[in-house]
Amino acid sequence: MGSEGKKSEAPAIRVSAIGTDALKTVRIVRNSEIIHAVDRRARVEFEYVDRSGEEGPVYYYLDLVQEDGEKAISSPVWLD
């Protein structure tokens, strides 16, 4: 989290999340746009490959919301 890197091909994003309550939704956000979401799980583990081919620098972060309304947002990962 909170790192920088070079983008040479479609980035693979690995997600593993457990909340203090059931997770209502886990979203991957790229450049302020939700590109993938997983809903209603107790524990989330998945890999998402961003095949959008978007040019230029991009950033990704996770936005999580629990059933009890609590929320968490990860630090961004920047790719150039």
Image (cartoon, rainbow, N blue to C red):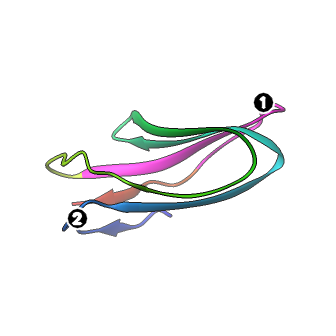
Residue 75 in percent (x, y) is at 51, 55
Looking at the rendered structure, which numbered label has been put on residue 69?
1
Label 2: how many residues lie within 10 Å, few (<14), some (14-19) or many (20+)? some
Q: Amino acid at mark 2?
A: Lys
Residue drawn at x 53%, y 48% is 62
Look at mark 2 in the image and give the residue it sits on: 7
Residue 5 in percent (x, y) is at 29, 69
Label 1: how many residues lie within 10 Å, few (<14), some (14-19) or many (20+)? few
Say which of 73 and 13 sits in front.
Answer: 13
Dot 1 falls on a residue whose secondary structure is loop
Q: Is residue 55 above or below residue 31?
A: below
Residue 20 in percent (x, y) is at 85, 50
Quadrant of the frame with the C terminus: bottom left
- In three-dimensional space, the C-alpha distance between marks 2 and 1, rounded to whole angstroms, equals 34 Å
Residue drawn at x 21%, y 64% is 9
Q: Which residue is the extreme one toward the top?
A: 69
Residue drawn at x 18%, y 49% is 53
Question: Could you say which quadrant of the image residue 26 lies in?
Answer: top right
Residue drawn at x 78%, y 30% is 69
Q: Is residue 80 left or right of residue 47?
A: left
Q: Amino acid at mark 1?
A: Gly
Residue 62 in magenta stretch: yes
Identify the magenta region. 58-73
